[in-house]
Image (spheres, rainbow, N blue to C red):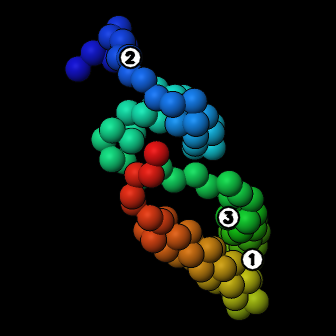
Amino acid sequence: MARTKTEHLDFRVTPEQKERLLERAKKSRLSMTDYLLALSEQKKIVVIDDVSEIIKQILKIGTNVNQIAMVANTNKSVSEKQMIMVNDNLSKLQDILADLVYQIKNEKDEIDV
């Protein structure tokens, strides 16, 4: 299938409909073309505004794993406290990701343009 978009489609909408489409395309962080194509294919458009908590938890886990690896390589053992710290962070991350998946799955699927 050709990736170059060479064909044009023209259709009419009211000024209010156009404004709504422009706002929703902007909110979805898609171009108008990509937004309208997604709607026409009845794709679910999911926008995640703030992933900073997920990123923060992943960075903490990475730091903990690096610290444990360094200690394990030096001492040939890892403390229970370090393992608990990693498990706690993994549990927090799992809860955050589960909540995110739940929210995505329960978004309404109707197309209200």
Foreground: disc 2 or disc 1:
2
Q: Name the residue under label 3.
A: 54
For the residue labelled by badge 1, is the local secondary structure a helix, a strand or a loop?
helix
Whether residue 66 is visible, yes or no, is: no
Proximity of marks 1 and 3: CB atoms separated by less than 8 Å: no
Foreground: disc 3 or disc 2:
2
Q: Mark 1 points at which residue?
A: 75
**Disc 2 or 1, which lies upstream in sequence?**
2
Residue 62 spot, x, y in % from top left: 69, 63
Q: Residue furthest top?
A: 6
Question: Mark 1, residues whose alpha carbon is within 10 Å: few (<14), some, or many (≥20)?
Answer: few
Residue at image position (51%, 31%) is 14
Residue 103 spot, x, y in % from top left: 52, 70
Proximity of marks 3 and 2: CB atoms separated by less than 8 Å: no
Looking at the rendered structure, the kind of residue marked 1 is Asn
Residue at image position (33%, 47%) is 42
Residue at image position (73%, 65%) is 53
Q: Residue furthest front?
A: 14
Residue 10, disc: 2
Residue 22 spot, x, y in % from top left: 59, 33
Q: Name the image quarter holding residue 63.
A: bottom right
**Disc 1 or 3, which lies upstream in sequence?**
3
Looking at the rendered structure, the kind of residue marked 3 is Ile
Whether residue 67 is visible, yes or no, is: yes
For the residue labelled by badge 2, is the local secondary structure a helix, a strand or a loop?
loop
Q: Name the image quarter holding residue 105.
A: bottom left
Q: Pick whichever, 50 or 111, lies toward us.
A: 111
Residue at image position (74%, 77%) is 75
